[in-house]
């Protein structure tokens, strides 16, 4: 007899083919155009894997009003992203738009905000970007909106069932902050979902970020707030993207003091140590007394991931999911990273079977 996820009989998952509208062919690393890692095929691989598991049932994705996004992102950034490709298009001979100047903190006076260069499209692109690995193409805005719709559709399901649901979001979101894109991310799907979840449940919620990379965007969005507790375990920023945030001493400010929790991982961390640290995080989240949880699921912690340096095996993901299930809270899982295409699908599916209360797969 197979145990079932709470309330639904099978585990609901949400997916939009509109993600394919964000289809850059290249990103720029060390000044060199290279094939991108965050490609549309990633989401198709995961969708195919879940489609052949009859205990996962697809849910209907609804369109949500932009106001939900504006609760987390600066509306001026949302306006800009909608126009960015069209206004920058005349300045590039490629279909991807990539910035060449960035708003460095050293270009601001004190705490003052730099002025948005509204009449200079490429400078405006640099005003809202922090790296050269996050190209914008014609369909980026629409795809990014669809990723938020996917996450919020999963949230609706979870608020109804008090169970677990999965949003196969692409593009990912956890590097995007209030008014900044980067790290393959445009809208912060997890942050939008968590803010809305806290509002609708009427109590604090947690985001547990298990992606290899620190979710700098999520951290910064909630850094001075006590409605969302952010907990992340990730490659130490002293060697891992995004490099400038994610240190253990970053614990929140003001009302958010104590509401941010970073655990730095050394290179080569494998299953046992990882699961031990994740269990500790689970206890920390439990102690916060939150009433819901959003999981930023990245499987770039995998040993074969091409851009990361941990050593998790295929066997790590089911127990990782199972640990988070022990929170026994309404849970939305949103997809972040994971770039080893060979085992991306099975690792996501294993995690989801763990968090969804389904049986372990034989091949684990
Ligand atoms: Zn990542």
Image (spheres, helix red, strand yellow):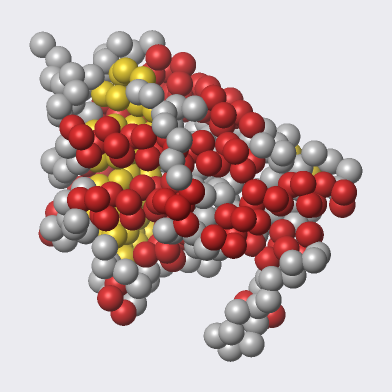
Please tell me how many numbered marks the rendered image carries.
Answer: 0
What residue do we see at 19% from left, 23% from top? 8
Task: Assign the N terminus to one quadrant of the image.
Answer: top left
Q: Position of residue 280 (x, y in %)?
A: 20, 53
Identify whether 286 is placed above or below 172.
Answer: below
Front residue of 8 and 293: 8
Q: Position of residue 341 (x, y in %)?
A: 53, 26
Instruction: Determine whether, in the image, residue 144 is placed left or right of residue 132.
Output: left
Identify whether 308 is placed above or below 202.
Answer: above
Q: Residue furthest bottom?
A: 110
Instruction: Determine whether, in the image, residue 45 is placed left or right of residue 200.
Output: right
Q: Is residue 58 visible?
A: yes
Q: Is residue 280 visible?
A: no
Instruction: Determine whether, in the image, residue 28 is placed left or right of residue 112.
Output: right
Q: Position of residue 190 (x, y in %)?
A: 39, 48
Toward which corner of the image does residue 77 lie, by quadrant?
bottom right
Task: Assign the C terminus to one quadrant of the image.
Answer: top left
What residue do we see at 24% from left, 50% from top? 200
Q: Residue furthest left?
A: 1
Q: Position of residue 55 (x, y in %)?
A: 27, 15
Instruction: Determine whether, in the image, residue 284 is placed left or right of residue 271.
Output: left
Front residue of 72 and 207: 72
What residue do we see at 27% from left, 32% from top? 157
What residue do we see at 75% from left, 57% from top? 99
């Amino acid at each position: 007899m197979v145990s079932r996820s709470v309330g639904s009989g099978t585990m609901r998952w949400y997916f939009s083919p509109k993600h394919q509208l964000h289809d850059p062919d290249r990103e720029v690393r060390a000044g060199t155009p290279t094939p991108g890692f965050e490609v549309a095929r990633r989401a198709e691989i995961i969708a195919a894997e879940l489609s052949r598991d009859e205990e996962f049932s697809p849910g209907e994705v609804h369109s949500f009003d932009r106001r939900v996004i504006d609760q987390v992102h600066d509306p001026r950034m949302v306006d800009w992203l909608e126009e960015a490709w069209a206004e920058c298009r005349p300045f590039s001979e490629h279909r991807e738009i990539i910035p060449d100047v960035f708003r460095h903190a050293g270009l601001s006076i004190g705490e003052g905000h730099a002025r948005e260069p509204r009449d200079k499209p490429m400078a405006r692109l640099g005003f809202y970007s922090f790296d050269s690995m996050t190209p914008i193409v014609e369909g980026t805005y629409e795809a990014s909106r669809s990723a938020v719709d996917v996450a919020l559709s999963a949230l609706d399901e979870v608020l109804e069932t008090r169970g677990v649901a999965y949003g196969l979001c692409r593009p990912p979101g956890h590097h995007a902050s209030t008014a900044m894109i980067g790290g393959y991310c445009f809208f912060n799907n997890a942050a939008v979902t968590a803010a809305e979840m806290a509002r609708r449940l009427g109590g604090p919620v947690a985001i547990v970020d298990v992606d290899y990379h620190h979710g700098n965007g999520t951290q910064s969005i909630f850094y001075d707030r006590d409605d969302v507790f952010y907990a992340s375990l990730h490659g130490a920023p002293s060697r891992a993207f995004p490099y400038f945030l994610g240190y253990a001493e970053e614990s929140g400010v003001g009302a958010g003091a104590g509401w941010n929790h970073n655990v730095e991982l050394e290179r080569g961390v494998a299953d046992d140590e990882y699961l031990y640290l994740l269990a500790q995080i689970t206890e920390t989240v439990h102690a916060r007394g939150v009433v819901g949880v959003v999981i930023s699921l990245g499987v770039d912690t995998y040993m074969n991931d091409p851009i990361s340096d941990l050593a998790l095996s295929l066997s790590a993901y089911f127990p990782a999911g199972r640990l988070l299930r022990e929170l026994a809270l309404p849970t939305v899982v949103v997809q972040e990273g994971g770039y080893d295409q060979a085992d991306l699908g099975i690792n996501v599916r294993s995690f989801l079977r763990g968090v969804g209360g389904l049986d372990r797969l034989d091949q684990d």
